[in-house]
Amino acid sequence: MRIIAGTLKRKTILSVPGMTTRPTSDRLRESIFNILSTQVRMTRVLDLYAGTGALGLEALSRGAQRCVFVDNHKDALAVIKKNISACAMDHCSQVLSLDISRNLAGIHGKGQAFDLVFMDPPYGMNMISDTLVGLSASGLLENGACLVCEHALTDPLGALPELFTLTDQRRYGKTQVSFLFFGPSD
C-alpha cells in the first residue's frame, strides 16, 4: 500500500498482518479522494475503524490540518503508530484506542470537532447506524461535516439519524462508499 497523492505521494505504508483488518485499496482511496477533491485541505479529520491509518494519512498528505485515528485492535494500533512515524506526521496526529461501537466519549473529552470523518467499520456487523447515532450525539461534528462511509453492499446504511443527509453513493465491486453531510438542511 502507498499514499496516492500530496506531500507523501508514493510513500509506502504497512498493513496489519492477518485477516482481521481489511485495508482500503489504493484504487478505492484514489477514487474517494478524487470525489472529495479540494474539500480535504485544512480539515480536522477523524478516521474511525482506522485499520492501517491509510485514509487519515492520505488526508494529511493532501493538506488536512490534523487527524485523530481511532481503532481498538492492538495490531492495528501498532501499525497506525508506525505508519504515522514513517510519514513524519506525529505532530498533527493522535491515535486513540476506543471501542467505537460502545463509546465516543474518549474523543469528546478532548474538545475536538471534525470537518471530515472516515468510517470503515468491519463488514457484516451492522455497525454503521450505531456509529452515526453516536457521532450525532457526541458533539464531535462541525455543521457541514463530510462523512465518508465504506461498507459492504450487504451492510446498507439504513435510516439515517437526524441531521445526516446522503449526498452521494458509489459502488466499487462488493464495496459501497456513501458520502454524508452533517447539519441542518437548507
Image (tube, rainbow, N blue to C red):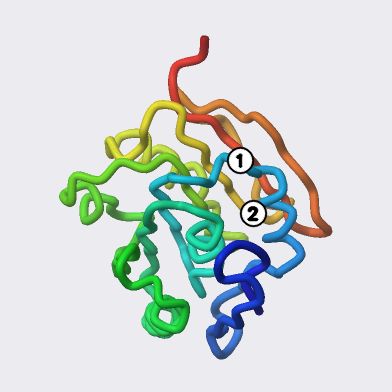
Decide if residue 97 is on the left or right side of residue 13.
left
Q: Which residue is mark 2?
A: 151
Q: Are marks 2 and 1 in contact (CB under 8 Å)?
A: yes
Query: Which residue reaches farthest front?
Result: 7
Residue 167 in the image: state x and y as whole percent.
65, 29
Label of residue 111 in the image: none
**Of 183 and 176, which appears nearest the observer?**
183
Q: Residue at 56% x, 30% y: name it.
A: 159
Q: Residue at 55% x, 90% y: name it.
A: 17
Query: Which residue reaches farthest top?
Result: 186
Decide if residue 94 is on the left or right side of residue 152.
left
Q: Residue at 28% x, 39% y: name it.
A: 138
**Of 103 and 62, which appears nearest the observer?**
62
In the depicted structure, whether residue 51 falls above or below residue 41: below
Decide if residue 11 is on the left or right side of residue 30.
left
Q: Residue at 64% x, 43% y: name it.
A: 36
Residue 41 in the image: state x and y as whole percent.
50, 46
Sequence-wise, the earlier of marks 2 and 1 is 2
Q: Secondary structure at mark 2?
A: strand
- Crowding near pointer 2: few (<14 within 10 Å), some, many (20+)? many
Q: Which residue is mark 1?
A: 157
Residue flagged by tag 2: what amino acid is it?
Answer: His
